[in-house]
Every structure is written in structure tokens, then in C-alpha cells.
Image (spheres, rainbow, N blue to C red):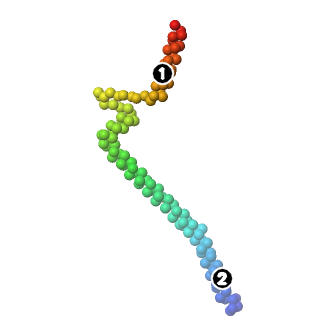
Amino acid sequence: MFAEGNRPIFVFSSSLLFFAFVNLISLVKDDGILDVKRFETEIVHLRQEFQANLEENNRIRMQIKNLENDKTIERIARQHLGLVLPGETVYEFIPSDHLKSFFEQTTSSVQQIDSLN
């Protein structure tokens, strides 16, 4: 079929073609090299996300632990909800710029009333 001198070239060419075909198949088939690389990238991303979730869980656990303290609950109730204990007196300080505008409005209202009389 082949001349004796062409047989090694044919075997080499066939082997090379077979090797190229096998590599091509390993790249594009399901679970091929491309899929493996994509899965490896996804695994890295998921590990990072998992680590971030662990850190967030630890932060939330610390917040929960702090909320079990009565002093923390009282501080939050006072600062954020304006709550006071029975018998306490609350003093509210008004910034001076608000007082100025209040007095200007009051003065103009008094002048309008005086002009009516």
C-alpha cells in the first residue's frame, strides 16, 4: 500500500493527527480542560465569598453578644429611640443658629400683631 520509505512519515503524520484530535476533544468536550479551568475559577470565587460570609457571620455574632448586655440595650434605647428612665429629666440644647431663626420669626409675628392693633 505504501512504499517502504513513506511508512515512517505516514505513522508520524497519523500519530500527530491522532494526538491533535485527542487534544481538541479534551478541550471542547464536557468536563474538558476548558470546563476544568472555568470550574477552578469558580471554586476560587466561591471560597472568597465563603470567607467573606464567615467574617460577616462573626461580626453579627459579636453584635448579638453585645446586645445581650443590659447596658448596651439601654445605651441604644437612649441614643436612637430617645427613651429615658422614670424620674429622669431631659434637657435639650438647641443650636444657636436655630434660636436666631426662631427669634426672628417670633419678632416678625409680634410686629404683625402690633400693626393690627
Q: Position of residue 16 (x, y in %)?
A: 63, 80
Would you say the residues marked 2 and 1 are in contact, meaning their CB atoms lie under 8 Å apart? no
- Quick one: label 1, few (<14), some, or many (20+) residues within 10 Å? few
Q: Position of residue 48 (x, y in %)?
A: 47, 58
Residue at screen point 46% across, 25% down: 99
Residue at screen point 47% across, 56% down: 49
Left or right of 46 on screen, residue 71: left
Residue at screen point 59% across, 69% down: 27
| Picture layout, residue 61 above or below residue 107 | below
Q: Secondary structure at mark 2?
A: helix
Left or right of 87 on screen, residue 10: right
Farthest residue in the top direction? 117
Residue position for label 1: 103
Please name the amino acid that badge 1 sits on. Phe
Q: Nearer the viewer, residue 101 or 34?
A: 101
- Quick one: label 2, few (<14), some, or many (20+) residues within 10 Å? few
What is the number of callouts on the image?
A: 2
Q: CA distance from mark 2 to mark 1?
A: 100 Å
| Picture layout, residue 65 above or below residue 106 | below
Residue position for label 2: 13
Q: Which mark, by number, is residue 84?
A: none
Q: Position of residue 1 (x, y in %)?
A: 70, 88
Q: Nearer the viewer, residue 64 or 74?
A: 74
Please name the amino acid that badge 2 sits on. Ser
User: Which of labels 2 and 1 is toward the front?
Assistant: 1
Q: Secondary structure at mark 1?
A: helix
Q: Earlier in the sequence, mark 2 or mark 1?
A: 2
Q: Nearer the viewer, residue 74 or 65?
A: 74
